[in-house]
Image (spheres, grey):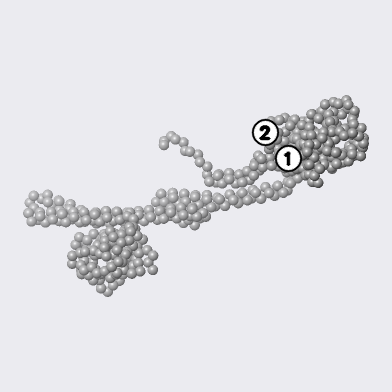
Amino acid sequence: MIGSRKKWRPSIAMVIAVVCAALVSVPLLALLAVRLTSNQFVRETEQSLIQQGAIYAEIYAEAFTVLDGPLIGTALDNDQKEHWNANLHPARAQLNVRRESVAPPRPDGEPVTDALDQRHADIIGPLLEIARRSQRTTLAGVVFLDHTGRELNTDGAPSLAAVAEVQTALSGDIGAKLRARDDDFEPHAFSSLSRDTGFRVFLTYPVIVQDRVIGVVYLSRTPLNLGKFLFQERYALLTMLVSTVIGATLIGLLLLRLISRPIHALRDASRMIAADQQPDDNPVLHYGLRELADLGDSVSTMAETLSRRSQEISTYTDHVTHELKSPVTAVIGAAELLQDDALNPKDRAKLLGNIETQARRMNRLLGRLRDMTRLRVTQGGKPGQLAQMLPQLDGLKVVMDAAPETTLPLSVEHGQMILHHMAQNSRAHGAQEFRVEYADNVLRVIDDGDGITENDSKRVTEPFFTTRRDQGGTGMGLSIVVAVLDSYGATLDCLPSAEGAVFEIRFRNAG
């Protein structure tokens, strides 16, 4: 439409580039989207704190047990007793950054004025010393709480009993929580990247003596963040990145060679065909994909067909012009002579007869041309019996040298047309017998007429070629036969013969 803008469409090269970029970026984006690395780092940190908490809790319980005193702490229920008294009671990490939100920083706790239980006061010193030495390696913060959630560091230390994870441990279970660091708490919906450095893992492990929670080990640590992990694995990641980029580049180049180049070659070939030019080379040789190769074959076949049809049309136009020139000239000349009033009746009748003869010749020639044009686009029909195709012409004996039930790969209508034209040619050249033989997908037609010279045998199937032009021949009979046979993939050949004419029709798949 005039004035309309051409719609923008991406090129194949651009699409391939986007696909290759996606090959590199999509895995990384997916990794960040599901927070897989952050989740793994948190799980590893939590599992490490569980292991440390179990050791601290055993030391805590052992030190508390050797001291005399009344039972204190919350009693375990039956399920908890069964779990903690089992020979093996492994604890697995439960935190998941995809499901849990980061809680605010841990509160400072509430002040307490009551004195510590003496047993807790007696054991806190050694526990803190063990924790201090262990922190050099574990880097984890450790706080020891009593059975009420109060810190054991000093008298007057605050109580953390109101903290959610501490309450979980005081009830007999392991508690865990993701909490923001004091200097980096700014909760928002898109905190997936900042969370790697903005939160800590807090874990509470119950200390159990005589099926009662007599204290809690409260641990915390910042998990490994993505930046540190990438730095630690920088060489491996660089190798992976280079390999991925090289692989994506090779895939892109392969796609360009297999898809883009063949399509451009096909486009160029189509443009040359549209400009009535032959492609410089065979573009099918460059097609790496089967479908593109099939498409290229189809385009090449179409180009050959169009070229052949164009050449045939040009040839037929030249022949028709030449063939019609003589009768048209004769008709015009006769018409001019008829305008003479002094022309005697005998000459007038002769000129009128000449006009009628030439007009009939032109009509016959045009009729044959129409038949040939129609047959050029006619598809082959179903096989028919040879006996039903035999012609019947006065003065010509037709003999079939084949079994009565012989079937040809021709429709009965087309078979009748072919044999009728060939029989007419035979009778016109003095033949009295017309013999038809069939074997091994080859139909042989033999007559006893005047025969065909060696030079004429090479041109006998050419349109408008005739040796009987002065007798009204159009030279289109065998051309029509060839046009019909083309639709079946069959060929017509004139064979040398000492007497008469011999034609051989070879059908497809002939041996």
Say if 360 sits above or below 140 in the image.
below
Count residues near mark 2 (Cα–Cα under 10 Å), then give few for <14, some for 14-19, many for 20+. Answer: few
Q: Residue 9: percent from the left, percent from the top?
A: 51, 41
Decide if residue 175 is on the left or right side of residue 124: left
Q: Residue at x 64, y 44 (%)?
A: 27
At mark 2, the secondary structure is loop
At mark 1, the secondary structure is loop
Decide if residue 18 is on the left or right side of residue 178: left
Residue that carries the numbered disc 2 in the rendered image: 190
> For residue 198, which numbered disc appears in the image?
none
Say if 347 sits above or below 451 in the image.
above
Q: Residue at x 14, y 51 (%)?
A: 336
Kindly indicate the quadrant of the structure image that contains residue 213: top right
Q: Say whether residue 90 is visible.
A: yes
Q: Residue at x 87, y 41 (%)?
A: 59
**Mark 1 belongs to which amino acid?**
Gln
Mark 1 vs mark 2, foreground winner is: 1
Say if 290 sits above or below 9 in the image.
below
**Mark 2 belongs to which amino acid?**
Phe
Inter-mark Cα distance, 1 to 2:
23 Å
Quadrant of the image containing the C terminus: bottom left
Count residues near mark 1 (Cα–Cα under 10 Å), then give few for <14, some for 14-19, many for 20+. Answer: few
Question: Camera-side residue: 493 or 278?
Answer: 493
Instruction: Give the total number of marks visible in the rendering.
Output: 2
> For residue 94, which numbered disc appears in the image?
1
Quadrant of the image containing the N terminus: top left
Decide if residue 4 is on the left or right side of residue 162: left
Q: Residue 210: percent from the left, percent from the top?
A: 85, 38
Q: Residue 95: percent from the left, percent from the top?
A: 73, 38
| Farthest-out residue, bottom | 498
